[in-house]
Image (tube, helix red, strand yellow):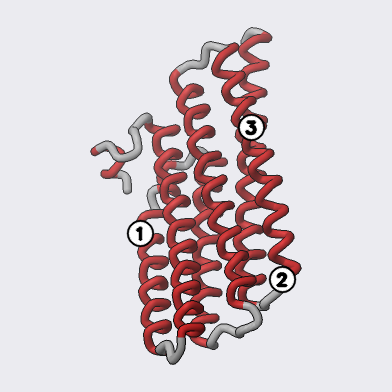
Amino acid sequence: MTDTRRSYDEQLHEIRGDVVKLAARICEQVGAATASLLERDLAAVDRVYADRVEIVEIGSALEQRAYQLLALQQPMAADLRALLAVLRILHEIELTSGLMRNVARATRRLYPHELPPKVSGIIERMGTQATTQLRLAIDAFAESDAALASALPDMDDVMDDLQKDLFRAIFALGAPDESALQRAVQITFVGRDYERAADHAVTIGKWVGFMVTGAMPGSESADQTS
């Protein structure tokens, strides 16, 4: 192996490792945003916001490193797919971070009202499910495991069911006044944010499949592995 090739492989390995680390921070952010909402912790909201800024900055720096590697080297097909997957996964990570900022923001909009017990329980489960899917997606990326990634679409059905449960719980409460209606709408948005975060995990899994097999996300061959 030439020194140039060794340097390229080392840089790609480092970039992938840093993407995994950044994704781990997203999982922590999901937990922090969920806790801020359930515990009505306004100070935690500020921490989630600060994490969002750092995640975006780190993601942008990783994107630049990936683009530089593309521009200055001549990656072979498998390595080129890995770099393209890195860029797409970074995009999904940033979007997920934005969703968790939205969840944390809901803490302020609902404060000082406490969530009804059933609603609180469902939201806690949604946060757990989002974290589980994101961790599995990034594990699949770290291990280049397309089979592991292919489990994500079926896991996403769990989140879809939880979102339906949340809607039912909200409707069962009723909205006796305008203030209660606004809170119900806000909680609905929170449920949507978790559902979209789970969708981003599924998308990461599809890009892992592309990285490993070459099947483009959305193509017939990619769908057959889902």
Crowding at mark 3 (Cα within 10 Å: few <14, some 14-19, many 20+): many
**Residue at image mark 3:** 62
Task: List x then y, in percent, for residue 197.
Answer: 48, 56
Are dots 3 and 2 in contact, CB under 8 Å? no
Q: Quadrant of the N terminus?
A: top right
> Dot 2: what SS?
helix
Disc 3 from disc 2: Cα separation:
31 Å
Disc 3 or disc 2, which is closer to the eye? Answer: 2
Are dots 3 and 1 in contact, CB under 8 Å? no
Camera-nearest residue between 84 and 189: 189
Task: List x then y, in percent, for residue 146.
Answer: 42, 42
Residue 126 circle label: none
Crowding at mark 2 (Cα within 10 Å: few <14, some 14-19, many 20+): some
**Residue at image mark 1:** 154
Quarter of the view holding residue 19 = top right
The vertical placement of 23 against 164, above or below, is: above
**Residue at image mark 2:** 42
Camera-nearest residue between 118 and 140: 118
